[in-house]
Image (tube, rainbow, N blue to C red):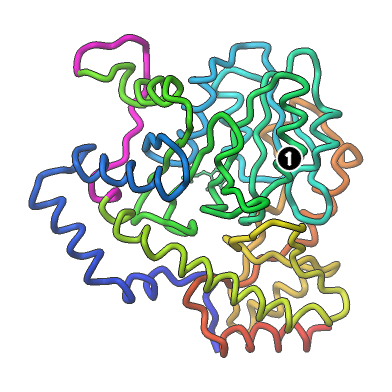
């Protein structure tokens, strides 16, 4: 049985009427760039994300850039982030004008280790960017305590963790700003690129709005030099149509994770994803560890099961960071994980028979 890694077509078929109507409305109203559909989505997303302000932008990478620019990072500033993430998180620190400092992951949840953050702090550190990787919330109590002690800002990278909760509180509501991606494969995905920053701080929201709109709120009044990073109307309408379904899609992912956990956790050498106490994992990815990861992946792929490695090289070891000369022993968890992690097919509509096929193949491998 072929099992795709994700199936965006299947999701579209379940809500085709709603999506098609949303797109047709934008075309009818000529609301292609910003406009009423974008305004409506920003309101609805802020409410759903339990924050006061949502500023939409072109993608989750720009969201990180806008957040740091609004927090006014400057050359010489250092920003600490997780050693294992998508490169946007660290690359935007550099592009915003600061210097990246990596902190190792905790070895169990794939999210950043607060003790490693503390160890990475210097007199030049200005902020921390935890990443709620794979949909598992980072340890926000510990991170916010460190931020408070050292007077640092926090930007939460929520690109993989739409509406996950930490001790009952939604991710993205702890730090000064949180960033979201609506890349098509994310838990809430557009049909193209899209992103947003959210905050409870009205002046930061206004500053990020200006930055994303050529430096002004009113046409031809440029208060600063901004960039052009906008959500288009069609993507906003699609996201607004999908948003009411997100909670049930998340429950379906969580149920699918339970099925995987039950089928895989007794198998020798397989480590199923750990969920730390009092956290809700939204399973953007279901990532296991296995000491013979590459052979297991080859076995699954040869039998029609698509897998992915997120991410095969932890950030400190990428060519992009060769200038820092970082070594594996400085990031032992990220370094070990990069050769053991394997993401299995995970999407809200995955069928029990598809999961059974994956579990059976993993079992017969060992
Ligand atoms: C997807 C992602 C981003 C970037 O989002 P884009 O919309 O693709 O620019 C940033 N950080 C993390 C952790 C991501 O997974």
Considering the image in quadrants, where does the C terminus appear?
bottom right
User: Residue at 57% of width from left, 90% of height from top?
Assistant: 353
Question: 3 above or below 156?
Answer: below
Predominant SS of the magenta segment? loop
Instruction: Find residue 150 and report its horizontal and vertical position in percent.
Output: 76, 20
For residue 22, side relative to residue 92 (left or right): left
For residue 177, side relative to residue 106 (left or right): left
In front of the other: 354 or 35: 35
User: Residue at 64% of width from left, 71% of height from top?
Assistant: 344
For residue 184, side relative to residue 144 (left or right): left
Query: Which of the 4 image quarters holds residue 213?
Result: top left
Instruction: Find residue 137 and report its horizontal and vertical position in percent.
Output: 66, 50
Instruction: Find residue 127 and report its horizontal and vertical position in percent.
Output: 67, 24
Residue tagged 1? 141
Check residue 307 for magenta coloring: no
Mark 1: few/some/many CA within 10 Å (<14, 14-19, 20+):
few
For residue 191, side relative to residue 6 (left or right): left
Q: Residue furthest left?
A: 28
Instruction: Find residue 29 and report its horizontal and vertical position in percent.
Output: 9, 47
User: Residue at 48% of width from left, 33% of height from top?
Assistant: 199
Query: Which of the 4 image quarters holds residue 337?
Result: bottom right
In front of the other: 109 or 332: 109
Query: Which of the 4 image quarters holds residue 314?
Result: top right
Question: What residue span does the magenta drawing correspond to?
Answer: 219-236
In front of the other: 274 or 184: 274
Question: 200 above or below 4?
Answer: above
């Amino acid at each position: 049985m072929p099992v795709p890694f994700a199936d965006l077509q299947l999701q579209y078929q379940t809500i085709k009427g709603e999506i098609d109507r949303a797109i047709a409305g934008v075309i009818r109203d000529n609301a292609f760039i910003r406009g009423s559909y974008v305004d409506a989505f920003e309101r609805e997303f802020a409410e759903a994300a339990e924050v006061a302000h949502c500023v939409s932008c072109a993608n989750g990478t720009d969201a990180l850039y806008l957040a740091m620019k609004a927090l006014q990072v400057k050359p010489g500033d250092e920003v600490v982030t997780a050693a294992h993430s998508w490169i946007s998180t660290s690359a935007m620190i550099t592009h915003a004008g600061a210097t990246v400092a990596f902190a190792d992951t905790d070895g169990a949840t794939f999210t950043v280790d607060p003790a490693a953050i503390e160890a990475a702090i210097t007199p030049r550190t200005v902020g921390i960017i935890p990443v709620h990787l794979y949909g598992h919330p980072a340890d926000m109590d510990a991170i916010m305590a460190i931020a408070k002690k050292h007077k640092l800002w926090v930007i939460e990278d929520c690109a993989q963790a739409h509406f996950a909760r930490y001790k009952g509180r939604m991710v993205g509501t702890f730090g000064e700003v949180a960033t979201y991606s609506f890349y098509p494969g994310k838990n809430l995905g557009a049909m193209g690129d899209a992103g947003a920053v959210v905050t409870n701080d009205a002046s930061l929201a206004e500053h990020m709005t200006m930055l994303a709109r050529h430096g002004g709120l009113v046409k031809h009044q440029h208060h600063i030099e901004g960039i052009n990073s906008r959500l288009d109307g069609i993507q906003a309408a699609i996201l607004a149509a999908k948003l009411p379904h997100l909670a049930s899609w998340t429950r379906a992912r969580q149920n699918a994770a339970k099925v995987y956990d039950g089928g895989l956790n007794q198998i020798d050498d397989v480590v199923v994803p750990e969920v730390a106490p009092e956290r809700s994992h939204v399973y953007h990815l279901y990532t296991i560890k296995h000491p013979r990861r590459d052979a297991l992946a080859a076995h699954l792929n040869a039998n029609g099961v698509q897998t992915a490695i997120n991410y095969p090289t932890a950030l400190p070891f990428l060519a992009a960071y060769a200038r820092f000369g970082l070594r594996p022993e400085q990031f032992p968890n990220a370094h070990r994980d990069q050769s053991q992690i394997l993401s299995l097919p995970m999407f809200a509509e995955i069928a029990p028979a598809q999961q059974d096929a994956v579990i059976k193949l993993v079992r017969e491998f060992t």
